[in-house]
Image: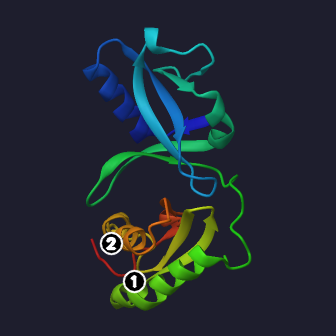
């Protein structure tokens, strides 16, 4: 169902050791959209288990899966990663999400986001060999993909959250969420050397 790397197992056990009584790890899906599912991991005590949790015994600890998350987590791997500016659990899912659209998104929001990317955002990050592409628009949610120097870059999350998201939300207030659907694990970090 769901696999844990050795690093993730060690960290879960270390956190459990610090929190007496919490012997299970709950994994819930958060709103990340169909193209980029996101998950929340929390330690829970015996009395916090919910009746409809699916329990997976991993030997050292139990994983509790929310029923609505089971399909998204099928074949997933939980890892603990340490990068330049962040450390934490990362859930890598098998690509069961809806495929990316083959046609460029259209409509008023798509047109405005694409124009903002082309005129302001991409010229600024081109100096670092990066590019951000509009992949899809679903309602008021925007899906972008980072390429070039941005894919796999240690600062890509900061670029997205503190730069790109802020600019899009300020310029196009009807946008309610921006999702990064980039496969950063396959990026080779071509601009920054660590």
Q: Residue at x 35, y 64 (%)?
A: 161
Q: Residue at x 73, y 78 (%)?
A: 103
Q: Is 190 on the left or on the right of 178, as rendered?
A: left
Marking on residue 84: none
SS for callout 1: helix
Give the x, y percent position of residue 110. Answer: 59, 76
Q: Which residue occupies the foreground of this view, 161 or 141? A: 141
Question: Contact, CB < 8 Å: mark 2 with mark 1?
Answer: yes
Distance, label 2 to label 1, CA atoms, is 8 Å
Give the x, y percent position of residue 182. Answer: 52, 67
Q: Quadrant of the C terminus?
A: bottom left
Mark 2 crowd level (few <14, some 14–19, many ≥20, 10 Å Cα): few
Marking on residue 121: 1
SS for callout 2: helix
Q: Is residue 1 visible?
A: no
Q: Is 98 on the left or on the right of 113, as rendered?
A: right
Q: Which residue occupies the foreground of this view, 178 or 132? A: 178
Q: Quadrant of residue 157?
A: bottom left
Q: Quadrant of the N terminus?
A: top right
Q: Residue at x 50, y 65 (%)?
A: 174
The residue that mark 2 highlights is: 163
Give the x, y percent position of residue 32. Answer: 53, 51
Q: Which residue occupies the foreground of this view, 105 or 83? A: 105
């Amino acid at each position: 169902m769901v696999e844990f790397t050795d690093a993730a197992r060690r960290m879960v056990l270390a956190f459990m050791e610090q929190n007496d009584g919490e012997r299970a790890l709950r994994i819930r899906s958060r709103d990340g959209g169909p193209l980029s599912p996101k998950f929340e991991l929390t330690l829970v005590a015996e009395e916090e288990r919910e009746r409809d949790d699916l329990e997976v015994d991993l030997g050292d600890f139990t994983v509790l899966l929310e029923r609505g998350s089971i399909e998204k987590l099928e074949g997933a791997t939980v890892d603990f990663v340490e990068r330049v500016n962040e450390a934490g659990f990362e859930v890598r899912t098998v690509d069961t999400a809806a495929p990316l659209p083959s046609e460029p998104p259209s409509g008023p929001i798509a047109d405005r986001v694409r124009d903002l990317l082309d005129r302001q955002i991409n010229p600024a990050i081109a100096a670092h060999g990066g590019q951000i592409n509009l992949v899809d628009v679903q309602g008021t949610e925007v899906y972008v993909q980072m390429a070039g120097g941005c894919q796999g870059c240690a600062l890509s999350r900061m670029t997205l959250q503190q730069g790109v998201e802020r600019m899009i939300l300020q310029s196009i207030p009807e946008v309610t969420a921006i999702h990064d659907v980039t496969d950063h694990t396959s990026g080779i970090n071509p601009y920054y050397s660590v």
